[in-house]
Amino acid sequence: MEDLAYKLVKVTEAAALAAYKLAGLGDEKRADQVAVDAMRTELNSMEIDGTIVIGEGERDSAPMLYIGERVGTGSGHGIDIAVDPLEGTTICAHYKQGAMSVLAAAKKGNFLHAPDVYMEKIAVGKNLPEGVVSLKNSVEENLNSLAKAKGCKISDLIVTILKRDRHNELITKIKNLGARIKLIDDGDVAAVVSLINGNHDMYIGIGGAPEGVLAAAALSSIGGQMEGKLIFDTDRLKERAKSLSIHDTEKIYAIQDMARGESVFIATGVTNGELVDGIKFSQGSCSISSLVILPSKVIKIQTELKVL
């Protein structure tokens, strides 16, 4: 898995570099498209038999890394791949902190094939009792349990949440319980994975299901905990669940359901963020920073490229 990881770093590096060239130019779609194109080109040059299981869309053929797309030369490792070529398209377009290119890979069948719907999520870092937090519990129960496990007060806890109107009630509850709240504009993969740094204590809220699987791949390797619940809250989405053979729409997925067995997670920075540094150009060279998470191992990689 480690050998494969080093090869796959070139994939996220290519996507990040392509996106960076459009950072701050205000064109989200274009930045995302060039990241997708660069990632696809690099993947297709690799000696792997890869299938995209978490991607940019679910169409049968499209100018994107769509779910079900085969990548690689067809020889070598048979793997399932989850991608977000540009996590934080808005962040990149406005040159804010935290844009990055993300990829995770595992043996075939080891990732939850999550449709592109919303997912309710809760996550904490490592070295905590199993089941310390759960979507089955109230916010108060989760904060009490987490504070007890960490040997601190609720007022010492920092909870990260996406800044969305749908979270207003949740934010009010957490504030009333005394915990501190870190609001983020975008980028919940980075928010969940950065739990490994200890800069915040819990991630909670509703975000994309594909991003949930990507984050689970990282956390599962380092002993973090996470739960997710797919949201099928309209008649159209309930029909969609049936078409995907998802019979229990209330199921709470444990981290082991989302990322089974060993996996590799790679994030390459586009702009500076909590998880990884952004791309830097200076004096004819370019510096690219990546983070690789393998089972019980976190590796930081710095690549220096000459710029013609």
Image: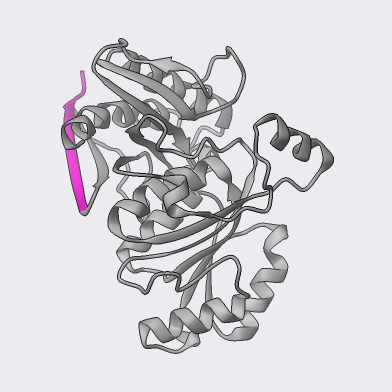
Drawn side of residue 159 relative to residue 47, left or right: right
Q: Residue at x 61, y 68 (%)?
A: 136
Q: Residues in magenta? A: 297-308
Find residue 47 and report its image quarter.
Answer: top left
Residue 6 percent coordinates (x, y):
19, 32
In this view, 27 is above or below 187: above
Q: Which of 242 and 178 is in front in this view?
A: 242
**Which residue is at 65% across, 34% downward?**
245
Residue 244 figure quarter: top right
Residue 125: % across, % down? 37, 65
Q: Is residue 27 visible?
A: no
Residue 90 painted magenta: no
The quadrant the C terminus occupies is: top left
Q: Can residue 291 be seen in this view?
A: yes
Relative to residue 253, is residue 126 depicted above or below?
A: below
Quarter holding the N terminus?
top left
Q: Main secondary structure of the magenta part?
A: strand
Q: Which of 225 and 38 is in front in this view?
A: 225
Q: Residue furthest right?
A: 235
Q: In this view, does 189 lie above or below 107?
A: below
Residue at 28%, 13% in the rendered image? 45
Residue ID at (49%, 28%): 31
Residue 299 on the magenta segment: yes
